Every structure is written in structure tokens, then in C-alpha cells.
Amino acid sequence: MKKKVPISESGELHSASRCGDILPGTLEGLGLARVIRHLTLLRAWDRVITLRIRERATVEALRDGRLYLAVEDPIWLHELHMLRHKLKGLLNEELGEPAVEEIILRIGRASRRSAIGTPKARGHRSPVPSDGAEARIKTLLAPFEDLPYREALERLIHRWAARSI
């Protein structure tokens, strides 16, 4: 069977593109840019903010340069208010851009993870593929290792693999 080569309407051949090169633009085109930014921020939060703070404050949202945090009590709210410029600097340095312009604190329940609908937050378990399928998934995801949407992509592939069995 002969492979079809993609040809544009003008008759030019299209070269193959790496999935890692086109995926960010595709996700943004699907309106997922905000989710990607949120996931990137959560990854930066987990990397640079100490466990002591992460246990008492939860990232709720990042909108228009404002990072909204829920803090478990007034004492921690005051502490983080005093540290907000340092936290902002650490996060922006980790993100590689000035994404966080202001940190807004409120007293609320500090959960383990943001309110984005992750399987952990909803109580779902990811299906477990066979060892051979797991190895193929790891190989497939290798180019996305440091990208913020890697975990979401892995969950999606695991769900697809579970349905295909």
C-alpha cells in the first residue's frame, strides 16, 4: 500500500512536523491556553514554593496577572502577605516571564490541589495499561517531559488505552 503524501491546494508537498512542535499551538487554538498557563503555574508553584507554605495555601486561579491564593487562617494570610513579593519573584523566575503581577490572598480552605478538574480532585483512578502498552506510552510521551500539559496528555492516553482493550 502506498503512503499518501500531504499536498496543499497549491500542489506543494508538506513536510512532516513533530507533535511536540505543533501541540502547543493546537491546544491554544482549541481555547486551552488558560488551562496550559494554569498548569504551568501549578508546576512552578510545586517546584519553588516550600512544602510548609503549599500545605497552608492553595492556588485558586491566575487571571490578568493576578494570582489568587486561599490561605487556611489569618496568621498565614498575614505571613504570606509579608512574603508576597518574594513569592511573586520566585514564581516569575521559574516561569521565565512576569506572569504574576500581583498576589491576592483570601482566607479559605487550602486543598491539596487547585480546583481544576484533575482526576485526584474528582476521585477518579487512571486505568492501568499492560506493561507493553505502558512502555509505548512512556516512549510516546518522552518529548513532552518538561511541558506543563504532559500529565494531562498521559491521562488522556491512558483513558484511550483502557477503552481500546
Image (cartoon, rainbow, N blue to C red):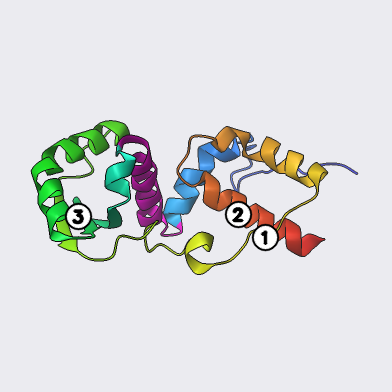
Q: How many marks?
A: 3
User: Which quarter of the rendered picture does the C terminus lie within?
Assistant: bottom right
Secondary structure beneath label 3: loop
Tell me the residue at 38%/44% (across/down). 40
Asked if the stretch drawn in magenta spans residue 42, the answer is yes
Q: Amino acid at mark 2?
A: Arg
Secondary structure beneath label 2: helix
Secondary structure beneath label 1: helix
Q: Amino acid at mark 1?
A: Arg
Tell me the residue at 49%/50% (across/down). 26
Disc 3 residue crowd, few under 14, some 14–19, many 20+, Cα 10 Å? few
Please report contact status of discs 1 and 2: CB closer than 8 Å, yes or no.
yes
Disc 2 residue crowd, few under 14, some 14–19, many 20+, Cα 10 Å? some
Residue 110 vs 53, above or below: the answer is below
User: Which quarter of the rendered picture does the N terminus lie within?
Assistant: top right
Q: Closest to the observer: 74 or 31? A: 74
Residue tagged by mark 2? 155
